[in-house]
Amino acid sequence: MRYEIKRRSGQTSVYYQFQFEKLASGSTFAGVIINHINYLISYNMLSKRSLVGVRSNFHTLAVLFFMLIGMQAFAADPAVESGDEAVAAGKALFNTNCKTCHKLDQKLVGPALRGSTDRSGIESVKSFIKNSAVVIASGNAYYNKLFKEFNGTPMPAHEFLSDDDLNNLLSYIEFGDVVDPSAAVATVGADGAAVATGGGIPNEYLTVILGVLVVVLLLILVVLGLIISVLTKYLTKQDLDADDDEFVNQKTDLKKVFKSDMFVVIVTALVIALVAKTALDGLYSVGLQQGYAPEQPIAYSHALHAGTLQIECQYCHTGVEIGKSANIPSANICMNCHTHVQNIQGKEGVSPEIQKIYDAVDNNQPIEWVRVHNLPDLAYFNHSQHVVVGEVECQTCHGPIQEMEVVGQHSALTMGWCIDCHRQTEITTEGNAYYDKLVQVHSASKDALKVKDIGGLECAKCHY
Amino acid sequence: MKIAKTVGILGIAVAGFSLASCGAGGENQGLEFAPQMYHSVAYEPLTQITDFETKGDLISTREDGKGEYFNSNINNPHNMNMREPVANTVPRDKNGYLPYRYKAFEVEESASTKNPIKLDDAVLTEGKRLFQLYCTPCHGAGGEGDGTVGNIIGGVANLKGGAYLGLSEGHIYHVVMKGKGRMGAHGSQITPENIWKIVHYVKQDLQGGQNADTAVAEVSDQDVTQVETPAN
């Protein structure tokens, strides 16, 4: 509906433009509404009154709208085609070449594009798309101002675009994908609601199921109690022989039970077993740091970076394939993204945690991360050996890092833990000439060639 | 007799439960047996103990009188253990590559640099793997600028877009190495050899080979046969 009106007003755009020239350029919302109203007014009034009256009405209304909404209307250079084919062809071009930096009606990396032909003229837009650096160097005031406004971010040259391509692109920019603001708001709202309800369902179900189970069990208990009392009442009224009578009227003597040898022996055994187990567990945990999860100077979340955003571990821990340690990234690696990302999505301002990176970079001050995994000095471990040659996944030893908000030590890192893995891990020997002789020597054995067979249990491999 | 028994049993129980609290968790590193074996006296990567004074729970055997576990380098800024290379020295890797000499703004000069890695299938496979490690977060698996991180940062180049198809391999290498526009410099993360492999993959697989290096450049100092020093 609205789209159609826009199109019709587009066809008579010369007239409207006369009215809006001074005010032109800007966002869809105001533009569509104003065009809409203009259209209705002109449609109703032109038939009855003179043009002069209509004009003054236009003007006051338009100004009123501007004051109320505070947005600018846009218009297009009349030379831009608005046909469906041109718009479709332009959309394809836009998606491959422009999408990552520009949106039609919002600022992204670069300015919102709709209305640009009107703001600076169709020819200068074309030359800017083709080679922006030349236009800026030529001293074009409008583009120089824009360039400054967007922090001097240069736009790559697009010399390969033909004139037809450019025309189509501009058609899409001016007339493509007109957003209906109310519809957009509605979908966002619906999405939000869906997300909100989506998370909680399984938990609620669990509690409900548990609650129902407890109620059912209680009911069964009550019913059983009732049955017992009814039966005893009935039996006491009957004539019973001595044995049965004793059975019905028996009373459990709690004191006797507590004092019985059996009870004392069982309880003592249980207590001793429990104490022994905790003591042994405690002794085994001496010198182990499994579960150690210290607070870090920056509340960095692996769950967000490695989990949600799926950044590979090696992107930051670059040493893991070339050295002994998988190094902690220095601040310049953080800055690859955090130059641009200053807060969690959708929040304004600079996050205090991200600010710490900026401070570190500005003051040339290292961030003092707390080391989590500590091997004693007596053991040698090399990351590159395990990751490159052994092709061990990071998570095999470090656990589900991509789910950890705060990183903790997942594995025990004891010698037994190392040896276990060396005993079980088979070696991929195919296509690696290094192993040829080892495979040959090993071929008499029934078992597959494992790390233990090529020295994985030798003391001096790790202790020297 | 009875009292002695009770005391004995209680003692065992108390010892058991106090031992149970030796385990690590949260901020607590847990009880260490022979801590002198855990804390390296020599410089350790990624850790440094700057505590000058604490002598530790046991008898310290240090001769310099510093804290028992102190292992920082007092001569470095921030007592760091690692040092920057000596000024005005030139590192070479085992392929004989010299450091990349163009500055970040010298994009046009860099365009003439030739890819020193010979193109073959193994290089392309490795290039693809490296691309997935270092580039996909922003540029997306297909290089179309639609990675999960790229969507947040915005303004990520679509490597299959017309503006990028004709770029020379030297240009791509330069941008990965030094950064350009919104992209940061990745020279500290990826070795030069690996960047050239990524460049091969981008040129051949993603961009269909347009303006690729056909002739493989000679490494300027190839005649310098490097005696490889074995890494320990």
Image (tube, rainbow, N blue to C red):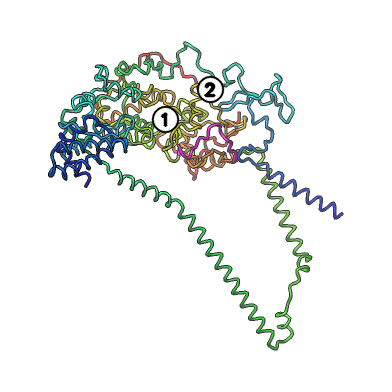
**Chain of the residue that carries numbered disc 2 in the rendered image:** A
Which of A153/B232 is in front? A153
Decide whether the magenta segment is chiefly helix, strand or loop.
loop
Which residue is denoted by mark 2 in the rendering? Answer: A365
Callout 1: chain: A
Q: Earlier in the sequence, mark 2 or mark 1?
A: 1
Image check: A142 left or right of A431? left
Secondary element type, mark 1: helix
Q: Are marks 2 and 1 in contact (CB under 8 Å)?
A: no
Q: In the image, which residues are magenta?
A: A290-306
How far apart are the two marked residues, 2 and 1, measured between alpha carbons?
19 Å
Q: Is residue A298 magenta?
A: yes
Give the percent coordinates (x, y) of residue B151.
36, 36
Q: Which residue is mark 1?
A: A337
Neighbour tally class for label 2: few under 14, some 14-19, many 20 plus, Cα within 10 Å? few
Q: Position of residue A339 (x, y in %)?
A: 42, 27
Residue B98, picture quadrant: top left
Q: Nearer the viewer, residue A90 or A386?
A: A90
Q: Is residue B114 above or below residue A259?
A: above
Residue type at tag 1 = Cys
In this rendering, does residue A442 appear at all? Answer: no
Circle 2: residue type? Gln
